[in-house]
Image (spheres, rainbow, N blue to C red):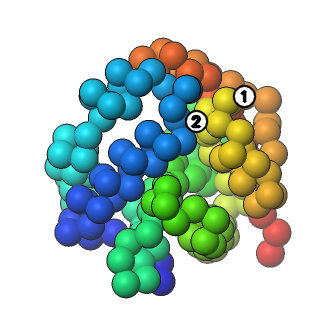
Amino acid sequence: MIRKAARDDAPRIAEIHVFGWRAAYRGIVPDEILFNRLSVVKRAPSIADALEADEETYVYEDGFVRGWMTIGDCRDEDAKDDFELWGIYVDPLLKRSGVGRALVGFCEDQARARGKRRIKLWVFKDNAPSRSFYEAMGFSTDGKEQLIEKLGAIEIRYQKYLTN
């Protein structure tokens, strides 16, 4: 079941976030960041605050939280009419279980319900598994790239046109 995240979900969301980053971004993001600066203890309070501020974060729960995502209007100046999948993470031990597909499907439903015709997302250029996942879900690159200086990594933007 997909539901809006609550403040009580913050520790589990932080856990999935931290361990998801470590599993997915090793070799893309410096180890100093992944293992010294990023921690569940540090992330949980800021996630709880964001959830209280009514950020659009949703969890996939089936007995326990297996994954989460944050969605909303696109933040990019050149795509203000679009919807955005701001971030999506599935517990690394539960990858390939359908959780990610369900979350993306929910994102698409939310975009359609708001009259949006296209979804954008950013992904690290060197993150081949995630890029393959998005491509399998019907997303394609739109030619935009950006350097995340504090991480020393390049992101590329993907998009998907929605059908009724």
Q: Residue furthest toward the front? A: 93
3D distance between C-alphas at marks 2 and 1: 11 Å
Residue positioned 49% across, 25% down in the render = 29
**Secondary element at image label 1:** strand
In the figure, residue 138 lies in which quadrant?
Answer: bottom right
Q: Along the line of sight, which residue is nearer the eye, 150 or 65? A: 65
Please name the amino acid that badge 1 sits on: Lys
Residue at mark 2: 76
In the figure, residue 154 lies in which quadrant?
Answer: top right
In the figure, residue 28 lies in which quadrant?
Answer: top right
Task: Tell me: 101 left or right of 54.
Answer: right
The quarter of the picture where the C terminus appears is bottom right
**Residue 27, position as x, y percentages in the image:** 55, 26
Q: Select label 2 or label 1 by which is in front.
A: 1
Q: Mark yes or no: residue 3 visible.
A: no
**Residue 139, position as x, y percentages in the image:** 78, 52
Residue positioned 29% across, 62% down in the render = 12
Are the residues flagged by discs 2 and 1 in contact, CB closer than 8 Å?
yes
Please name the amino acid that badge 2 sits on: Asp
Residue positioned 30% across, 35% down in the render = 38
Instruction: Identify the mark at residue 144; answer none if there is no mark.
Output: 1
In the image, residue 106 above or below residue 70: below
Q: Earlier in the sequence, mark 2 or mark 1?
A: 2
In the image, residue 157 above or below residue 7: above
Q: Mark yes or no: residue 68 visible.
A: yes
